């Protein structure tokens, strides 16, 4: 696919538990949901990092329109910080932009839109999929995907995109914008996140990202490439 790429797997459970224990976080800031004629009427958001003023205000001033600051929500979700900086390291990011957790209810929709050209040209967009179910479909340009829970995805946010959640569960994603070094321009996202096999695994037929994210620590047999867990490698994993 040109517009979506699965980068690596992670365990979403710790961050999900932190969010579930604090439902009031969804109501603390309704800026996106209430934005006039915006595409997010069905979405609730926990802001973790965001510009200190509106885009239009920043564009009219001499301030850096790409500057973002930590928001109050970040203090309540320490598991998010670990995932954010894991991703920053994996993609060799130079600057961290917007970070938010979005929840789209069953039957809800993110209406078709494209990110502003200046923002999309400066930042790459990544999604940590915390919760989703079959029937939740994400379209970008002429491609469509169901993003599996436990996966980290890159997608081309400069193109028109939309989400329709016809699944049974809330769609909860943590969205992270990262500016990459100009020397990495044009490098395929999956190339940037190549990692030792003890961290990242290729998916096999019928597997989802979370199958690996929730496994016990594993190592790879150098001769065969097979995954080995504690039960099969006595004395190797302590």
Image (tube, grey):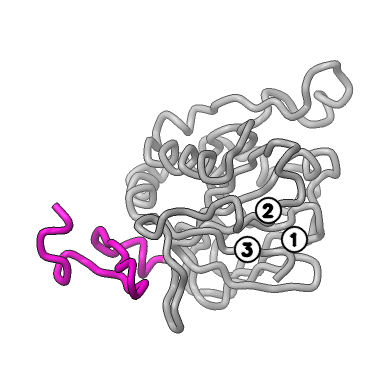
Mark 2, secondary structure of its residue: loop
Residue on which disc 1 sits: 111
Q: Residue furthest front?
A: 223
Position of residue 90 in the picture relative to residue 196 (left or right): right
Contact? badges 2 and 1 (CB < 8 Å): yes
Label 2, label 3: how far apart the Cα atoms are: 27 Å
Circle 2 Cα neighbour tier, 10 Å, few/some/many (<14 / 14–19 / ≥20)? some
Mark 3 or mark 1: name the one nearer the start of the chain: 3
Label 2, label 1: how far apart the Cα atoms are: 9 Å
Residue 118 figure quarter: top right
Residue on which disc 3 sits: 5
Mark 3, secondary structure of its residue: strand
Q: Nearer the viewer, mark 2 or mark 3?
A: 3
Q: Nearer the viewer, mark 3 or mark 1?
A: 3
Residue on which disc 2 sits: 41
**Residue at 47%, 68% in the rendered image:** 169
**Residue at 46%, 73% in the rendered image:** 203
Label 3, label 1: how far apart the Cα atoms are: 22 Å
Residue 130: x %, y % from top left? 45, 57
Magenta stretch holds residue 203: no
**Residue closest to the eye, 72 or 13:** 13
Please identify the quadrant where the N terminus is shown.
bottom right
**Residue at 39%, 60% in the rendered image:** 197
Mark 2 or mark 3: name the one nearer the start of the chain: 3
Residue 179: x %, y % from top left? 68, 37
Magenta segment, prevailing SS (helix, strand or loop):
loop
Residue 232: x %, y % from top left? 16, 71
Q: Is residue 111 above or below residue 48?
A: below
Residue 147: x %, y % from top left? 56, 67
Q: Which residues are magenta?
A: 210-238
Circle 1 Cα neighbour tier, 10 Å, few/some/many (<14 / 14–19 / ≥20)? some
**Residue closest to the eye, 26 or 116:** 116
């Amino acid at each position: 696919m040109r517009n979506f790429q699965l980068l690596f797997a992670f365990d979403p459970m710790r961050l999900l538990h932190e969010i579930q224990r604090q439902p009031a976080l969804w109501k603390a800031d309704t800026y996106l949901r209430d934005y006039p004629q915006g595409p997010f009427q069905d979405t609730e958001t926990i802001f973790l990092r965001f510009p200190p003023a509106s885009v239009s205000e920043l564009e009219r001033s001499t301030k850096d329109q790409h500057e973002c600051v930590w928001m109050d929500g970040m203090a309540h979700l320490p598991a998010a910080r670990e995932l954010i900086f894991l991703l920053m390291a994996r993609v060799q990011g130079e600057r961290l932009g917007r970070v938010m957790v979005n929840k789209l209810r069953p039957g809800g929709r993110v209406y078709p839109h494209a990110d502003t050209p200046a923002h999309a040209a400066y930042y790459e967009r990544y999604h940590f999929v915390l919760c989703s179910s079959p029937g939740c479909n994400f379209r970008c340009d002429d491609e469509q995907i169901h993003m599996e829970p436990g996966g980290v995805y890159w997608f081309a946010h400069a193109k028109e995109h939309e989400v329709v959640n016809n699944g049974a569960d809330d769609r909860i994603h943590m969205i992270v914008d990262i500016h990459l070094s100009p020397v990495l321009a044009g490098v395929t996202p999956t190339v940037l996140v190549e990692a030792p096999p003890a961290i990242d695994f290729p998916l096999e037929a019928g597997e989802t990202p979370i199958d690996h994210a929730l496994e016990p620590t594993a190592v790879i047999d150098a001769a065969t490439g097979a995954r080995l867990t504690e039960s099969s490698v006595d004395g190797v994993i302590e």
